[in-house]
Amino acid sequence: MLDVRRLRILQYLATYGTVAAAARALHLTAPAISQQLSALEREVGLPVVEKQGRTLRLTAVGELLVSHAEIVLSDLAAAESDLEAIRGGGGRGVVRIAAFASAARRLIAPLWKRVLGAGDQSGGALTLELVEQEPDVALETLRRRDVDLAVVHGYTVLPRDVPAGCEQTRLLEEPVLLALHPDRAVRMGIAPGGTVDLARLSDTPWLTPGRETSCYEMIQRACGAAGFVPSIRSRSSDFSVLAALVAAGAGAALLPRMTLPDVMPGPISLHPLLHPVSRTVCTASRSGTSGRPDIRHVAELLRQTAAGTAPVLQEATG
């Protein structure tokens, strides 16, 4: 019979890539990892890893075992979550969250207030920890078990899939809005709040986030679908900077609704798109852990926070 502990080690090796990294994550020594892998190969009767230069890589048999290990370990995590629920631990524990910047501001900060309102964290109740990360990094952090929940997003023009061994829950969907200085909108004959065909902005200077963000790629795809490559004058991954530049008349920007500043830095005209682009915000967790009482409790509070945030944002932009 296969040893579940050795399957977990193989899964960690697949996740972290090297014996040394897997050993650090499991709080074991590298020799101990190697010994357990050798024992697993004796159980299987086939090699599960092979040398590639100075590192090890999974064989086809090893990859097969990892795919089964994901299911087995997810079931074990679900069993542990169910047991914890029976013990009644929903109001205690530490839940680590990775979230992109606008979600951290619009969703996690209000969530934190809800949690603090339910009890004093210093008294051993539910504790939150937050790290700000872009979705791709957040999902990798989740996969490596460095966080319990990842708040991520995907666009209609740039969908995002969660990695194997993880599951996601939709929180909200928000429109991407075109932001222009009102004078520019008037010169283009665009009515306040009117719908705009992006093709009309092919000669307009553009303001975008950095190349490393999925928002940048979303803008490239949206403009590409409208038949042009945007002429980018400024890049900043701080959306409040982009809003300030729009208000200064520097160019046009595409802003997901949740990124809009609470107080506009100047005159900005916001417009829906003729061919709408929307951003879907989701939570992701490792399979089997969503039933853990503290994670389930935080996820539910986050869902309530998202439901309460959308109307406020709608009022602010509508």
Image (spheres, rainbow, N blue to C red):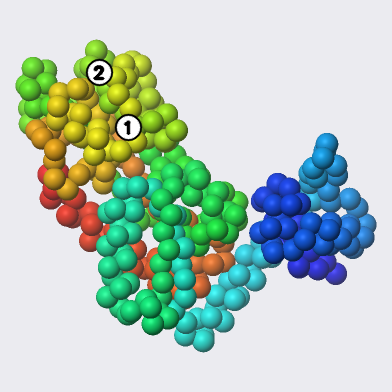
* Above/below status of 291 relative to 215: below
Please tell me which residue lies in front, 27 or 161: 27
Looking at the rendered structure, the kind of residue marked 1 is Ser
Residue 265 or residue 316, whichever sits in front: 265
Is residue 304 visible to the viewer in this orientation of the structure? no
Give the percent coordinates (x, y) of residue 112. Answer: 32, 66
Q: Please state if 20 lies on the left or on the right of 187 as rendered.
A: right
Q: Residue 62's spot in the image, x, y percent?
A: 80, 51
Residue 157 — which label? none
Residue at the (54%, 52%) spot, across then down: 141
Judge whether 182 appears above or below 2 on screen: above
Q: Residues within 10 Å of mark 2 (few under 14, many from 20)?
A: some
Left or right: where 261 falls relative to 86: left
Residue at the image point whose x is 31% and y is 16% from the top: 231
Residue 221 locus on image (x, y percent): 39, 26
The kind of secondary structure element at disc 1 is loop
Q: Label 2: which residue?
A: 205
Q: Residue at x 47, y 75 (%)?
A: 93
In the image, what residue type sits under mark 2? Pro
> Looking at the picture, does residue 283 appear above or below residue 76?
above
Closer to the camera: disc 1 or disc 2? 1
242 to the left or right of 133: left
The image quarter in which residue 174 lies: top left
Mark 1: give few (<14), some (14-19) or many (20+) Cα within 10 Å: some
Picture residue at 42% right of the left edge, 81% below the top: 124
The N terminus appears in which quarter of the rendering?
A: bottom right
Disc ID at residue 236: 1
